[in-house]
Image: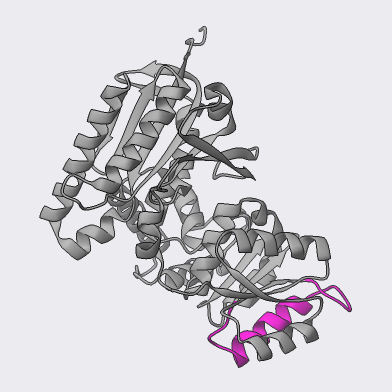
Amino acid sequence: MPERSGVPKTFLIADVRGYTRFTDEHGDEAAANLVESFARLTEKTVSAWRGSVVELRGDEALAVFDSCRAGIRTATELQAAYVRGEDGIPIPVGIGLDVGEAVPFGKGFRGAALNMAARLCGIAAAGEILATREVVHLAGRMDGVTFEDRGAARLKNIEDAVGIVRVVPEGDDPSSAFRSAESTDERPIRVVLADDSVLFREGVARVLGETGFSVVGQATDADELFDLVAREQPDLVVTDIRMPPSHSNEGLIAAQRIRSEYPNVAVVVLSQYVETRHAIKLLQRSPERVGYLLKDRVSDIAEFAGTIRRVSRGGSAIDPDVVAQLLRRGEEGSALASLTDRERELLGMMAEGRSNQAISEVLFLSPKTVETHVGSIFAKLGLVPTADDHRRVLAVLMYLRGT
């Protein structure tokens, strides 16, 4: 059967940030008013730029355009409208844009460009617009808009790194209206880095500095790391698992000692390779404020920053590749075999320390759908559900250890 031909389209996906939390804090009626306002503003602005709202599901919207320029103009006007709000109440929305061929399907479309727009929307902060470089290239220079290159990053379920550009309207930055509300600390998170590779260490320091962290010290070995922690009392330590003199597990031992002697200091251990025994050893005693990530994760700036921020605030994180390997080991003859592909994907994200709301934003699923999947996972694995993110991680880890 011949493939159905696609047509070039620009896709815009917008999503209200923190909708579940807003509902919990303000009630169902206020939440309903919020999404109704979101829908009216979206439909009005999209229509003005000759676009079409293909799908509108509560706090999520998908729109399609025949040109990249129209998509970008709509996105900037939408963010301005969301910040103003209909009743003077700002609506925190992240927007993602991509362009490519798409196949008409029912009343909507299917295609890689739509999926990419969803991924970018998932990592966009409230008030932000993130687009692929292809969108910006095709749009060309535009008055009243600047483009900030965010570099290449790896996104969930996307094989190759993606070039990301932030679209910023001239004048007031819409995202600034939400930064103070989203921040739980007035001061930046203070970090000490440890790695014997100067180039890698400086690269991580740059990434952290650009994403709002404060790097207060850098170490090349475990002894220097201990001295810095004692002197600086940081919020977080990011350390390589292998350091001088033997380049075996000095970083792991250092992380365990820091967690024992300085329980308020969070620790994220970075490894070049998947070493499940080290991940289990690090997390099994006390998973709070502990993370185990592969060094490759640093290249995905948004994901890396989000993960270590979760850990610094009391959460836990296991690298998804570690979870994947543990899943493969324990698959045959265990309850893992009963999990669907979607449930496996969610299990990996749970192990990363993500809340249901965070998972829904990344996968472009409704919070209710995620809650249903998580409940099914816990039921199949015989685990007791819990709202605490680090206990979810521990439950997953304990199960995987026993498979």
- Work out which quarter of the rendered image holds the C terminus and state it: bottom right
Residue 308: x %, y % from top left: 56, 66
User: Who is closer to the viewer here, 178 or 308?
Assistant: 178
Which of the pair 349/172 is nearer the observer?
172
Vertical placement of residue 25 versus 137, above or below: below
Q: Is residue 79 above or below residue 217?
A: above
- Left or right, residue 240 beside residue 386: right
Q: Residue at x 18, y 44 (%)?
A: 86
Residue plotted at (19% across, 35% down): 40
- Considering only vertical position in the picture, is 239 above or below 108? below
Q: Quadrant of residue 280?
A: bottom right
**How are the residues colored?**
one colour
Rendered residue at 38%/48% (across/down)? 174
In the image: residue 246, left or right of residue 366: right
**Residue 96 in sight in this render:** yes
Which residue is at the front of the view, 385 or 84?
84
Q: Residue at x 50, y 78 (%)?
A: 288
Residue 261 magenta: yes
Q: Quadrant of residue 66?
A: top left
Residue 128 picture location, percent across and down: 43, 46
Which span of residues is magenta-colored? 242-266
Q: Is residue 357 visible?
A: no
268 falls in the magenta region: no
